[in-house]
Amino acid sequence: MLFTLLQTPAVAAATAIPETNAAQLNLFDLVLKGGVIMIPIALLSVLAIYIFVERLLFIKKQISSDTTFMNTIEGFIRNGNIESAQTFCKSSQKPVARMIEKGISRIGMPIKEIEDSIEIAGKFEVYKLEKNINVLRLISGIAPMLGFLGTLLGVIQLFYDISQAGGDLKMDVVSNGMYVKLVTSVAGLIVGISAFVFYNWINTLINKAVQEMEWNTMIFMDLLKEPTR
């Protein structure tokens, strides 16, 4: 008798586990409940991730880690090896090298003209670094709006189903509309916030690259001005 009483709760618990697992909501099914509006949100998420990864790898590759670059350039210029300095710059794929190479090619001209040529070259290098990052900013604004649109569509669907149900209103009629309303809102916010973080992350790296270019340009211009001091 005692064994039977002890066994009964265990059997009940064992039979309850499958019911709990069956009641668990599958993430994929939950996304499908969001409806058609989830398609553009998903596409925006893929686009945001692609741009972020591509820009991250590109900018990290462009940021110079060679602390001896300007020392080498300085040595060439002090020794009058202008052609060697240009060749050394052309051998590098860094933005700062292309800027300094532009300045070296203008040596002999007034300092103002050299500064202007380097500044123009620097602007083009920054444009290259900033390519497509404004798309991330657009996604950070568009994705939540799409989620809000899905919310409105869910509310419309909800009230339509309620009106069609008449007096026979069941909970599943309400829940279908609520799924669409909540899932699209959450998805849009997640994609929008992620794109916003990606945009600012890339901007931080670009600012770091710009500071490096400005610092090396200042060193180069100081080097050219030394004979006139």
Image (tube, grey):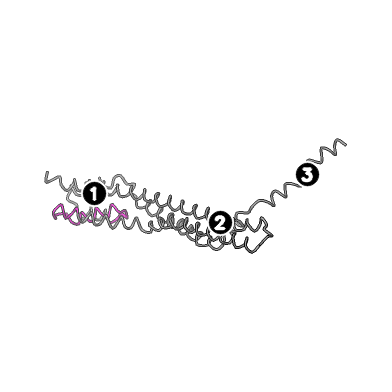
Location of residue 39 in the rendering, given as x and y in whole percent from the top left corner: 52, 62
Q: Which of marks 1 and 2 is nearer the N terminus?
A: 2
The region drawn magenta spans 90-115
Mark seen at residue 217: 1
Location of residue 120 in the rendering, given as x and y in whole percent from the top left corner: 24, 57
- Tell me the quarter of the picture where residue 119 sits: bottom left
Quadrant in which the N terminus appears: top right
How many neighbours does mark 2 have within 10 angstroms: few (below 14), some (14-19), or many (20 or more)? many
Horizontal side, residue 149 vs residue 176: left or right = left
Kind of element beneath mark 3:
helix
Mark seen at residue 181: 2
Horizontal side, residue 188 vs residue 229: left or right = right
Location of residue 225 in the rendering, given as x and y in whole percent from the top left corner: 15, 47
Kind of element beneath mark 2:
helix
Q: Secondary structure of the magenta portion, mostly?
A: helix
Q: Distance between the residues labelled 3 and 1?
A: 77 Å
Q: Do the residues labelled 3 and 2 touch (CB within 8 Å)?
A: no
How many neighbours does mark 3 have within 10 angstroms: few (below 14), some (14-19), or many (20 or more)? few
- Tell me the quarter of the picture where residue 173 sits: bottom right
For the point 49% across and 53% down, the residue is: 189
Q: Are marks 3 and 1 in contact (CB under 8 Å)?
A: no
Kind of element beneath mark 1:
helix
Q: How far apart are marks 3 and 2 (CA)?
A: 37 Å
Decide which of 166, 26 is in the foreground and name it. Answer: 166
Which of discs 1 and 2 lies nearer the camera? The answer is 2
| Residue under pointer 3 | 12
Q: Earlier in the sequence, mark 3 or mark 1?
A: 3
Question: Is 157 located above or below residue 213 in the figure?
Answer: below
Quadrant in which the C terminus appears: top left
Decide which of 62, 89 is in the foreground and name it. Answer: 62
Q: Which of marks 3 and 2 is nearer the N terminus?
A: 3
For the point 28% across and 52% down, the residue is: 96
